[in-house]
Amino acid sequence: MASVAARRVLRDRVRANRAASTQRRTVAQAARRVRTGARSLATHIIATGADRKTVEGVADALRTVAKKKGVKGRRARIRRSFNDARNVVKTVYRYTRAQVAQIAAQYKPRKAEYKAVRAALIAA
């Protein structure tokens, strides 16, 4: 009986370690990509170490600020699966670190975690 409980503990520990490792790897990859060239707003935010829900909220807000302030990223065309259709061509925008810092300087968040992301984006 104790061996079953011990296996559960080990299994849960392995799963937690794997999840933490995946998160660290994702942040490190995003940080490297941001340093090397223009990337999406979400990639810049992921590089700060924010969680998924925060990334989505801040990215939406930064897109709105960018549109209002007229900051234009570099246009790119990508192919994605979208609504059960394959290879749909989408237009996306890629931003440099300087552009993201400029957008973040204009962004005035209310939530504490969004404020932390804003500070990290300006500092980068």
Image (cartoon, rainbow, N blue to C red):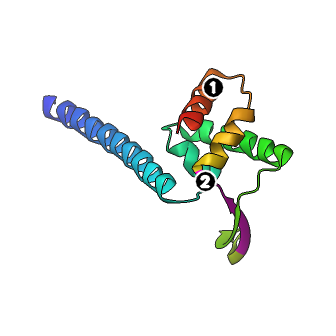
State the residue lying farthest toward the bottom. 87
Magenta part of the chain: 89-96
Residue at 44% in and 45% down? 27
Residue 8 got which mark?
A: none
Residue 53 x %, y %: 61, 38
Majority SS type along the magenta span = strand
Local crowd size for mark 1, using a 10 Å CA cut-off: few (<14), some (14–19), many (≥20): some
- 60 sits to left or right of 51: right
Asked if disc 1 and disc 2 are in contact, CB closer than 8 Å, the reply is no
Residue 14 x %, y %: 26, 41
Residue at 61% in and 36% down? 54
- The residue closer to the viewer here, 121 or 50, is 121
Residue 111 x %, y %: 67, 23
Q: What residue is pinned by disc 2? A: 96
Decide whether residue 47 is among the magenta residues: no
Mark nearer the N terminus (1 vs 2): 2
Residue 115 got which mark?
A: 1
